[in-house]
Amino acid sequence: MGQIVKTNSFSNLLSACNHLNSQFRTFCPTVEDGVEHYRPVDQMDDKQLQQVEAITFQNKPPVGSIKSFLFPDSEVYIKFARKGNKVEVEGLEAMSPQIVLGVKPCDIKSIELIDKVFLSEPVDTLYQEKRENTLIIATICSETGKNCYCKEFGICPISPSADILMLKDSQNKTDIYLKSSSEKGQRLLEQLLEMEGFTASETFPLPKTENLSQRLSPEKIQKRMDEYFESDLWENLAMLCMGCGTCTYYCPTCHCYDIRDFTRNEQGVRYRTWDSCMFSNFTNMAGGHNPRPSKKDRIQNRFFHKLNYFVKKQGDLACVGCGRCGELCPVGISIGTVLKKIGGGLNEA
Amino acid sequence: MFKITEKLQQIGAKLLESKEVDIVLGYKKGGDPYQSLPYIATSLEETESLVFDGFCEKSLSKYLLQDSFRNKKVAVVVKGCDYRAIKLMLGESRILREQVYLIGVECPGMIRKDKLKKEVGQELSEIEVVFNQDHINVPEGQSTREIKYESVLSPFCLNCKLSIPVEEEVDTLVRGENIPSTFREKSWTHEEAFIDINNIENMSVEEKFEYWKRQLNRCKRCYSCRNGCPVCTCRVCIFDRENPDYIDAAKDQLAQHQFYHVIRAFHVSDRCVGCGECSRVCPENIPLHLLNQKLQRELEKFYGSYEAGIDELPTPLSHARADEPDFFGREGK
């Protein structure tokens, strides 16, 4: 492993991906109606294709995160129908492999965190299938973005681990280098080498690794949170919070879901769908009791899950510092708001 | 800018000091210079953070319905559109007049950050933008470029029906200085301010369907449009019911998104105060206001002009009259 492949323009890579369409569906970040999302390359118009390169190499992740590829916002997993006296149940066809290109270091780290939840026993097979069939091509940020806290969360903006790491030559600004670090990645690079415009390379222009001395200690944050359990902070945040689900749905590490049936007449489907702990019916029980009746309880739970419970259970903070919550929250509440409030802030904790 | 901030801070401090109110609900600057966020001041010291500028677009009126505000006497900073929403809440007995102290502000119109960014052509955090009376100066190389204020203003504000709350009905009215007025001297009609809706009305049925399909397919049902709307005030929302048969939670079903968005727009159609919050809060940039605007246009055809929060209650759809137009019943029979 560790094959390096070079091509002299980003568009070569996009056309190669289109060429491999029968094997893989490729998704890249682009702009649709002013929002940055991963979209299938084969469905992009010329204008969107032109924007892919700039967005792929900018110093922040797109609005939509990688998690939708491994844990879609809604997925049907059983179909059922009544036939006479019997119920017929069928599963779904196996998914076809996909490539997601241009994933930033923060999102790569978020996959590691969600893996801890879904791939530990009992394994979530829906997630596992997507994880195995998704080839991730990561890219780096040349510097930390304006709203980003990745360094505080110990994520080096220049060395993500994925199937393939993609870099742009900092000298001539057009050459693209790809280096594999998994078997899946290796196989793709071998295929690319057979195509016109791709050559093997000895060198890989990885910038110097950055200093991560700003890193927050998960244990320290977890302890601080324990001290703040009874604080007014949560009520104060709840007073301004609007109670929508934006923070949870755009967070790359939020992974709560609900399972429901959708039935019409004699047939139906069972699906799982994202759910948000910011909604009051998230914890509503069948008997009518709601253990988190107020917005204060819900907002407190959300931050405790990220900065306390996850540390206790999985040994890491459930935040990758991507900055999406702060950017998208209509009233500007972010993980940084809480970290600054619990003292120690982003710099001393 | 506009010298409203200083006056607000003084008023806030006075109200807290005299214990006339328990909290002052206003705005403070966010981490980004072009961001103002809702803020609660409870002490004299905290009133020093109060601000008011062209980025205070969030509607504060909706907070008054929350339980955590109900047991307090709240002074709230209101722009014209917020005042309109409060007038609806008062008329519908959702809040008590003596529970709130209204600090009306003369609104300069709110700036759309996405429009400003487009005009400026780079990330807003990287440059210093200077606000002048009716234009904005943006550094460009060695020189500066002028951008007309009206070209970055929210179309809702260009078409604003009430930029200053009614003086007799608020407790204090704060007037600004150097409020850009050029855009108000020209009276913008609905057609001029909202170009998009005219474009959509000219589309064929198929084009309209494709347009809305693309927009609504991005919806994640985060409900920020519902929660941010100052007139979407039902105690229990139909979309919060447990497992209702009429809507499905799946987030990839276009029909369900259509159902949600059409119901949302219908429910606020005759109550819309035109603040534009629904479109602004949407993380997917779905132009939700177009649905509201379209419904308002249609309502006007049937019921005549009605401006929620300016004209007296009841709103056209909240009551019925015998001589009302009948769209469904007698036709063709």
Image (tube, coloured by chain):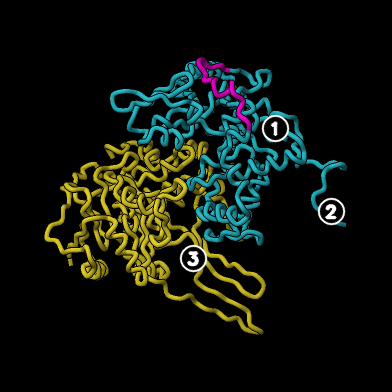
Chain colours: A yellow, B cyan
In percent of width and height, residue B271 lies at: 68, 38
Judge the density around disc 3: few (<14), some (14-19), many (≥20) Cα neighbours within 10 Å. some
Q: Is residue B316 left or right of residue B156?
A: right
Instruction: Report the residue at 28% width, 44% height from top.
Output: A152
Alpha carbon of mark 1 to alpha carbon of mark 2: how far?
Answer: 29 Å
Front position in the image: A231 or B325: B325
Q: Which residue is mark 3?
A: A75
Give the magenta part as a residue range: B174-189
Q: Is residue B252 above or below residue B275?
A: below
Q: Identify the chain of the residue marked 2, using the numbered disc in the image.
A: B
Give the residue drawn at x 58%, y 44%: B199
User: What is the secondary structure assignment of the residue under circle 1?
Assistant: loop
Q: Helix, strand, or loop for circle 2?
A: loop
Chain ID of residue with mark 1:
B
Instruction: Specify the subunit that label 3 lies on.
Output: A
Q: Position of residue A6 (x, y in %)?
A: 19, 59
Whether callout 3 and callout 2 share a subunit is answered no
Q: Position of residue A123 (x, y in %)?
A: 38, 69
Residues at marks 3 and 2, CA–CA distance in whole angstroms: 44 Å
Specify the amino acid type for callout 1: Glu
* Among the two numbered marks 1 and 2 on one chain, the one whose residue lies closer to the N terminus: 1
SS class, disc 3:
strand
Q: Nearer the viewer, mark 1 or mark 2?
A: 2
Q: Find residue B166 and report its horizontal and vertical position in percent.
A: 66, 21
Q: Are marks 1 and 3 on the same chain?
A: no
Q: In the rendered image, which residue does mark 1 sit on?
A: B307
Residue B179 inside the magenta-drawn segment: yes
Going by the numbered disc 2, the residue's amino acid type is: Glu
> Which residue is disc 2 drawn over?
B331
